[in-house]
Image (spheres, grey):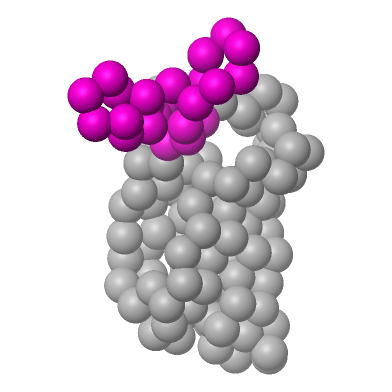
Amino acid sequence: MKRFTISVTTAADGTATAYSPRRISGKIQQIEYVKTDFADGVDFTIEGEATGIDLWVEANVNASAVRAPRQATHTNVGAAALYAAGGVAVLDKIALGNDRVKITIAQGGNAKTGTFHVLVD
């Protein structure tokens, strides 16, 4: 398991964009947000830079949080893979291949900081 730490500091308008320190290859196990002093109600968009694949999109976050992002899987003909009984989507870990994690912050407050830890297997 590898941990990539990304510290983010907002501009005066409460926005910021930051990237993982290097390109990542592997399956995202979890993303940990450690609140330093981002304003309550901060919005995150965390994605793969090259592909734009969503890893974590959440609005109005007020405290440190951990998420284990998953995506829907599909059959070999492109149909959604579903659990037979309930028709609920089958989810699996999201993989990145030689891609950076891009973090976009909105409503974070003037010159405020937060840290993200991306755990990759």
Residue 3: name its quadrant.
top left
What residue lies at 47% left-to-right and 42% top-to-bottom?
A: 118
Image position of 52 (left or right of 95): right
Which of 80 and 44 lies nearest the eye of the viewer?
Answer: 80
Q: Where is residue 22? Give x, y as percent.
A: 69, 37
Q: Is the residue 114 above or below the residue 78 in the image? A: below
16 drawn magenta: no
- Magenta span dominant secondary structure: loop
80 drawn magenta: yes
Find the residue positioned furthest to the right: 50
Image position of 92 (left or right of 18): left
What residue lies at 24% left-to-right and 31% top-to-bottom?
A: 86
Q: Is the residue 121 above or below the residue 53 in the image? A: above
Residue 7 can be seen in this image: no
What residue lies at 55% left-to-right and 88% top-to-bottom?
A: 109
Q: Where is residue 9? Give x, y as percent.
A: 60, 73
Q: Which residues are magenta?
A: 70-94
Q: Where is residue 97? Give x, y as percent.
A: 67, 23
**Is the N terminus in the top left, top right, bottom left or bottom right quadrant?**
top left
Q: How many marks?
A: 0
